[in-house]
Amino acid sequence: MSSASVTKASNEAYSHVYTVEKCFEVLRDDYENERKILKRKVEDLESTIQDRDEAIQNLRRVREAEVEDAKRREQAWKEEVLKQVNGLKKVYKKQITSLQAKHEKEMHKKTGALQQQVDTLQADLAEAKSKLGDFQSLRGLPEELYRIGNRFLEGVGMDKNEKMAIQYFEASASLGNLEALFLLGVYHYKGRAPFVQKDHQKALRYFKKASEYGCTESCYYLGMMYEGGEGIARDYSLAVEKYKIAADAGHALSQYNLATMYNRGAGVDKNPEKALKYFQLYDASRQKE
């Protein structure tokens, strides 16, 4: 290779090295710039995080202060309410004491008047008993007892007193008064608080006794109780028997219930013709009402 070629090659090599060094310097400068930019971003981010942490701490302190303030206000409100309640208790206690005294005075007055009425009635009954001797054989007494019971029940000529009314109904029923027997049966069947509690077995006894005296409506209730097993074992045959007595006497609801028994074949052979007959009787009875 000639001296000129070597020199040329050497120059080209130096030129290439110089170019590479320049490129390296450019890359190094870019790297430094990027590192500085990234460092500033990291510093900014750290500053932002620190600001947020401080804001969170501030918010937490504000929230804690609000909670404490709310607790203080709630305690103050409770104390105020308790104070008002205690004040109202004192006021109501005075009012209740006054009302109780007034009520006791009125009750004493009414009790005295009622006792006078009871004394008068007892005197009347004692006089009737002394005149006729045998209390239970007194003709018309069961009806009179029932009538007095109705007066107490309705408050006619005396203060209304349902408890006394029931006592007179029971006395009338014990002497065989049909209306009193039926009424007490209804009272025990449905219940008439607070003086008569619902008791289907007692109702059954009253209805049976009333039906023996010819009360067709008692037969209707007996039919329902036998059909539904209320106070006694369910017995469709007896239900049909009782419904029929009342239905043949013209009791509309008994006619309807008997028709359904024939239609279902409950306690009796299924019989659409008889079912139709009693449905028609029911419609006719309803139209007469």
Image (cartoon, helix red, strand yellow):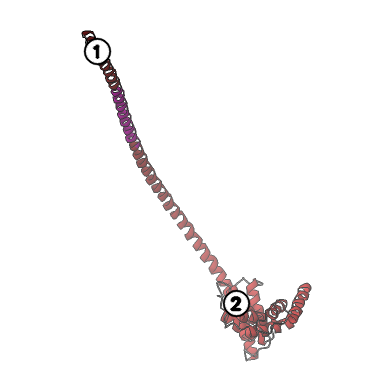
Q: Nearer the viewer, residue 113 or 260?
A: 260
Q: Element at badge 2? A: helix
What residue would you read off at disc 1? 9
Q: Is residue 1 magenta?
A: no
Location of residue 139 by image quarter: bottom right
Q: Position of residue 194 (x, y in %)?
A: 55, 72
Examine the rendered structure and indicate whether residue 179 appears above or below residue 39.
Answer: below
Can residue 125 be seen here? no
In front: 178, or 175?
178
Q: Report the side of 161 relative to 66 (left or right).
A: right
Please report the bounds of the magenta region as a residue range: 34-59
Predominant secondary structure, magenta span: helix
Residue closer to the observer: 223 or 22: 22
Of the residues shown, which amino acid type is indicated by label 1? Answer: Ala
Vertical order, 138 against 34 (above or below): below
Give the vertical position of 12 relative to 144 (above or below): above
Q: Give the residue type at disc 2.
A: Tyr
Residue at 51%, 66% (x, y): give it.
104
Q: Which residue is labeled 2 in the image?
A: 189
Give the vertical position of 25 relative to 84 (above or below): above
Residue 55 located within the stretch drawn in magenta = yes
> Residue 213, percent across and down?
68, 87
In 3D space, how far apart are the residues under numbered discs 2 and 1 (Cα atoms)? 131 Å
Within 10 angstroms of label 2, few (less than 14), some, or many (20 or more) residues? many
